[in-house]
Image (cartoon, helix red, strand yellow):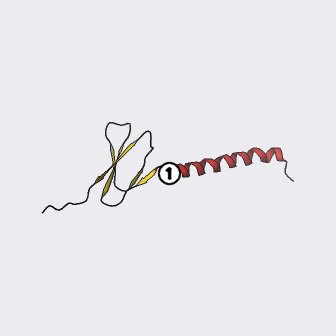
């Protein structure tokens, strides 16, 4: 049987890597904002010009500000 002093550091590293991947996936799920068709998502981040997305984007709540804009065609009578 293998010595536990050799297997424990390897098991710890594998466990930490799995936990980091799970936390990253949960953060992506929590902060990804999806928009419907006919709407643009405008993300104001730290740069001078805002970023425009038509499907969805990762929006961090405190760092970024999101705005929605309708871009569907409006008919005037």
43 relative to 3 in the view: left or right: left
Q: Report the front residue among 26 and 47.
A: 26
In the image: residue 36, left or right of residue 16 = left
SS for callout 1: helix
Tell me the quadrant of the picture where the C terminus can be found: bottom left
Q: Residue at x 55, y 48 (%)?
A: 24
Q: Where does residue 44 sit, x and y in percent of width and height?
A: 35, 41
Residue for point 55% across, 51% down: 26
Q: Quadrant of the N terminus?
A: bottom right
Q: Position of residue 15 (x, y in %)?
A: 69, 49
Q: Residues within 10 Å of mark 1 (few under 14, many from 20)?
A: few
* Left or right: where 48 falls relative to 21: left
* Residue furthest out toward the left: 77
Picture mark count: 1
Query: Outermost residue toward the right?
Result: 1
Q: Which residue is mark 1?
A: 30
- Between 3 and 58, which is closer to the camera in this rendering? 58
Q: Camera-side residue: 35 or 50?
A: 35
* Image location of residue 59, percent across then percent down: 43, 46
Q: Residue 35's image quarter?
A: bottom left
Location of residue 36 by image quarter:
bottom left
x 20%, y 60%: residue: 74
Name the residue located 40 percent from the left edge and 41 percent from the top edge.
64
- Residue 60 is drawn in which quadrant? top left
Task: State the image coordinates of residue 40 (x, y, percent, origin top left).
Answer: 32, 53
Frontmost residue, 54 versus 8: 54
């Amino acid at each position: 049987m293998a010595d536990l002093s050799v297997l424990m550091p390897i098991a710890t590293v594998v466990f930490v890597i799995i936990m980091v991947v799970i936390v990253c996936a949960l953060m992506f799920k929590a902060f990804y904002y999806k928009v419907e068709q006919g709407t643009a998502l405008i993300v104001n981040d730290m740069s001078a010009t805002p970023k425009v997305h038509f499907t969805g984007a990762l929006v961090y709540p405190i760092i970024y500000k999101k705005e929605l804009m309708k871009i569907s065609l409006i008919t005037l009578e």
